[in-house]
Image (cartoon, rainbow, N blue to C red):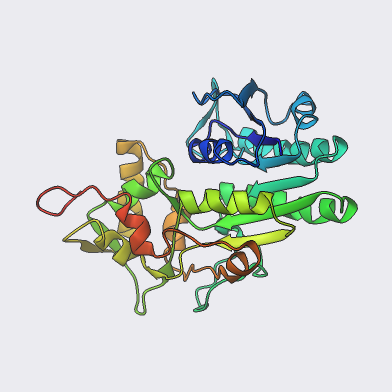
Amino acid sequence: MNVLVIGSASPLARVLLPALLNDARIGRVIGVDIRTGGFSHPRYRFRPVDVRAPELAVSLAEVDAVIHLGFAATGRRFGPLKLTRELMRDINVRGSQNVFTLAAEQGVKHLVLLSSAAVYGLDGLHRGSFTENHPRRPLSGFSYAEDKIVVEGWLDEFEQTHPELRVVRLRPHVIFGAHVNHYAKKLLRLPFYPRLPEPQPLTQCVHEDDVVQAMLLALFSDVRGAFNLATANAVPFRDLQRQLHRRLVPVPLWPAKLLIGLGSRLFGFNTGASWMESLRYNFALHSGRARRELGWKPRYDTVQDCLKTIANPVPDGRP
């Protein structure tokens, strides 16, 4: 199988590309991005192509499958351009539509979309875990989630008219690892947590290696549709931070949001008010479908296992 990776310079691609090329079932891998990413391998070819460009068809004609990671997020740049909200929407929505449309025209049969758990509407009264059928509804102002939902809504109709194209949508929770989500790691290292009413809302995460494992499983299976990816357990956000801190100071939610907004500007990481707002709600995913139908077996299957991979304690126990 020959595979095209859209967004080949993204942080997760640093994990995905070596995994693909270490798999004997993969022949060639083509990477498409506006940045090189610095990866090289005898069976890898990089092409600097905008995800919105018609030239993408040339690469799609050479592959059997596509893994689509190419999604712009607030706080980043798009090459030399400042990433405005309008440009972000155009890249994410029109770019994704271009990928799927050209893939169908070129006869590609398998397509894996990296979506997100952020598509789910959060319900403060919900105490269970979200299945893949939970309504898709973003938190207000969360532009990344808004674009993911638009793409998935468009894809619902597109799949109906192109049944020959097998599409798998992976919806990971917050991804941790050596290469991804630097803002989340910085957020966890803050010395305070938002004080929330009891019982504390629950949250999860998933490790980058386990997301890549799910992508490989999706390539070589017959499944279609959406699959949640998350650890088997869920814990309060406060307990995530306690993995990295001995002492934490509880702060009311609104001052905590202001402090984190200030930290974003001072220390160069973008959390967004919507991420803080999500802490008010139970945000746990049910990943049973991925485990049953994909055969997904996470190596890091607890929140604690994921956080151990990013912890770097100093002698007094603080990061």
Q: Residue, x 30% and y 66% (percent of image)? A: 239
Q: Horizontally, is 224 left or right of 118 in the view?
A: right
Residue that extends furthest to the left in the rendered view of this protein: 316
Q: Horizontally, is 205 left or right of 114 in the view?
A: left
Q: Position of residue 169 (x, y in %)?
A: 67, 54
Give 51 or 281, whichever is nearer the viewer.
51
Q: Position of residue 252 (x, y in %)?
A: 29, 65
Q: Position of residue 302 (x, y in %)?
A: 39, 65
Q: Is residue 66 depicted above or below 318 in this figure?
A: above
Q: Residue, x 16% and y 60% (percent of image)? A: 246
Q: Which quadrant is the N terminus positioned in?
A: top right
Q: Position of residue 194 (x, y in %)?
A: 31, 63
State which quadrant residue 131 falls in.
bottom right
Residue that extends furthest to the right in the rendered view of this protein: 161
Give 96 or 227, whichever is nearer the viewer.
227
On the question of residue 141 being in view, the answer is no
Residue that extends furthest to the front in the rendered view of this protein: 24
The image shows a total of numbered marks equal to 0
State which quadrant residue 49 falls in.
top right
Q: Is residue 199 depicted above or below 148 in this figure?
A: below
Q: Residue, x 54% and y 30% (percent of image)? A: 9
Q: Residue, x 43% and y 45% (percent of image)? A: 181
On the question of residue 317 being in view, the answer is yes
